[in-house]
Image (cartoon, coloured by chain):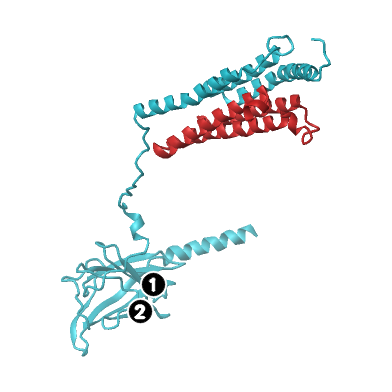
Amino acid sequence: MVGAHVLFLYSLLVAGVQASVLTLQSPRLTISASDATQLRSEPLSLTHKPTPPPTLGSTDVLKLTFQVVDEEGKGVQPHQTFLRFYDPVSGEEGVQPVKVTAGGKAKFDLNMARPPASLPPTTENPLKVSLYIGSFVHDPMQFELFDLVVPPSQPPAQHPDEASFHVRPEIVHTFRPEQKVPPKFISAVFTLFLAAPWVVLLGLWAHIRPQVPHLFSPSILPFIATLGAFEALLVWYWVDLYLGQVLLYGAILSIPTALTGKRALAAVGDWRLGKSSK
Amino acid sequence: AYYETTSTRLKTIDAFLVFLMLSGIIQFLYCILITNFPFNAFLAGFASCVGQFVLAASLRSQVNPANRNEFKEVSPERAFAEFALSSIVLHFFVYNFLG
């Protein structure tokens, strides 16, 4: 079983080796005008290109004929036969499949009055015309046939995304002018203005003379002290602390504040109601 | 009539309210006339005046003996405790915004 497979592969290899190289037999190039007068007709050489390069006018017809044969001279119909028109300067190219008969005979017509879709956009530069042959059972072949000069066509349409492959114009932003702090003198004047309400407050309080009879008694003072400590903690937060720290310290400080507050306000309540002895 | 009939405590709180009002007005005038930059500082200062005014006014109405019927469940001491606590919270937010 294995032996049969090996024999099969070997026979394929032998068959491949035997007839693996293709070549073109009697390739011929003909250029005729639109009224069928022959302008140029010559056989093509596979090793050097014809000089001068064939030139087509806008109504001329180019005809290319050849036969694909293997090493024994037998005609072969390869699986793929393509003609490639390539402009090396602009990089445009077009590929045209060529019909090959079972006997290997091929014929290709290029009528400039009705050019095929495979003809690429052309410029003044000549197109390189080459033949590509692909086959499952033979080695692939490529033949540089000739340089073709055709009338220049319209330039190819620009791709809609073309602009994004080149450097774009620089974006210029216009920003609002920076906000400025007003002159220091005006700030100082208004800070003095803000001292005025303090003067009013202290004046009124001096006039009213509110009484704080028990301010320094041991039940009231701790509460006042803890309230002052809370305010100091907030100022410290404004200057230095982080949020997590101030919340932690505030939570810790709230415990004595609550305790002293309860005591202080209970005492005040008792005084108000006339109950306590203190 | 106000001066005679109002107790000293209430007059103290009233003086504080007047002070807060003047303070707020001056800050607002500065914002309109000169500049509102930095805006967060103006908002913090102005909000501290307004907020403290609101808290002090509610304290005053709660401790006023004439309003005893309105605030049966709230003793003056409790009103003061609420005033102190909410003032601290207000100051915390003001300092946060002051920057």
Element under disc 1: strand
Q: Are marks 2 and 1 in contact (CB under 8 Å)?
A: yes
Q: Does residue A132 lie above or below B50 as drawn? A: below
Quarter of image, res B54: top right
Q: Position of residue A185 (x, y in %)?
A: 34, 26
Task: Please name the residue that numbered disc 1 is placed on.
Answer: A81
Element under disc 2: strand
Q: Does residue A258 lie above or below A147 as drawn? A: above
Residue A272: image tag: none
Q: Which chain is red?
A: B
* Amino acid tagged 1: Thr
Quadrant of the image for the N terminus of chain A? Answer: bottom right
| The one of A49 and B52 positioned closer to us in this rendering | B52
Residue at point 43%, 80% (across, down): A102
Quarter of image, res B53: top right
Residue at point 31%, 68% (across, down): A157
Task: Please name the residue that numbered disc 2 is placed on.
Answer: A106
Bin the neighbour count of mark 1 within 10 Å (Cα to Cα): few under 14, some 14-19, many 20 and up. many
